[in-house]
């Protein structure tokens, strides 16, 4: 069955520290891959996407993600976290209209 | 600025009542979507529409209905058949089926 797993429900990091959020998927073919961010009570904002080509993709707000086909992973990274990055992050995979979203990772940033 | 507008932001429903959530986009996108978000469960697809006058059921369509009479509008009706309607509802749109989805700010539905 197709699925997306975000193993970490909550992550806490100090401001200025590096960040890695994990995303693993199970899918028949190589799907389209996305990371979104959601602030409380708001909609989702696209951080970055992977369709094909270079496996390291750059997004907005200093985020990047690396697609690793052998590990079926698409982990999100940021070298130095800012307090404003505190939010919930969702990984999504799929193809043609129907995407599967992970259950999210809530990021807390300590001052 | 182009975007997706969902209204109202908060909505309350009485038992046995149908309610309609509004979603309007001015992005000129062909595709539109409705998701339900519950704590700890991520987003689940209710319905999606590839084009005007066409829509398909998603994973949890029971108790919901939609229409797509105009390109910019995709209202969702939560019927009395939906026994657990309390949730955060998100509308999205995309240029096409394999493009990123743009989201509205959501409507929170609660039962009185």
Image (cartoon, coloured by chain):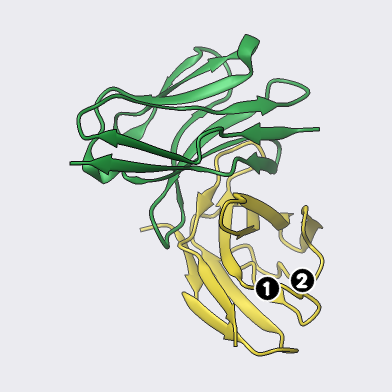
Chain colours: A green, B yellow
Mark 2, other Cα within 10 Å: few <14 / some 14–19 / many ≥20 = some
Residue at image point 51% right, 50% down:
B102
Q: Quadrant of the N terminus of chain B?
A: bottom left
Residue A12 in the image, given as x and y percentages of width and height? 34, 37
- Give the CA separation, mark 2 to mark 1: 13 Å
> What residue is pinned by disc 1?
B85
Task: Residue at the far top: name it.
Answer: A70
Residue at image point 38% right, 53% down:
A39
> In front: B109, or B93?
B109
Residue B95 in the image, given as x and y percentages of width and height? 58, 45
Can see residue A94?
no
Q: Nearer the viewer, mark 2 or mark 1?
A: 1
Q: Are marks 2 and 1 on the same chain?
A: yes
> In front: A31, or B29?
A31
Residue B35 in the image, given as x and y percentages of width and height? 63, 58
> What residue is pinned by disc 2?
B65
Q: Quadrant of the C terminus of chain B?
A: bottom right
Q: Chain of mark 2?
A: B
Can see residue A74?
yes
């Amino acid at each position: 069955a197709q699925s997306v797993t975000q193993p970490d429900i909550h992550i806490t990091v100090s401001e200025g520290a590096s960040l890695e959020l994990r995303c693993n998927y199970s899918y028949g073919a190589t799907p389209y891959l996305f990371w979104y961010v959601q602030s409380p009570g708001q909609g989702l904002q696209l951080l970055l996407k992977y369709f094909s080509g270079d496996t390291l993709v750059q997004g907005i707000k200093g985020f990047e993600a690396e697609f690793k086909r052998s590990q079926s992973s698409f982990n999100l990274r940021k070298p130095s976290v800012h307090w404003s990055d505190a939010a919930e992050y969702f990984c999504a995979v799929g193809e043609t209209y129907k995407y599967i979203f992970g259950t999210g990772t809530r990021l807390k940033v300590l001052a | 600025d182009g975007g997706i507008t969902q209204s109202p932001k908060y909505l309350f429903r009485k038992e046995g009542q149908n309610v309609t959530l509004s979603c309007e986009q001015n992005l000129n996108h062909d595709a539109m979507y409705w998701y339900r978000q519950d704590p700890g469960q991520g987003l689940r697809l209710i319905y999606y529409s590839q084009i005007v006058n066409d829509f398909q059921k998603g994973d949890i369509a029971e108790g919901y209905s939609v229409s797509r009479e105009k390109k910019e509008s995709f209202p969702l009706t939560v019927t009395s058949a939906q026994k657990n309607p309390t949730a955060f509802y998100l509308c999205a749109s995309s240029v096409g089926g394999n493009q990123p989805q743009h989201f509205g700010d959501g409507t929170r539905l609660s039962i009185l």
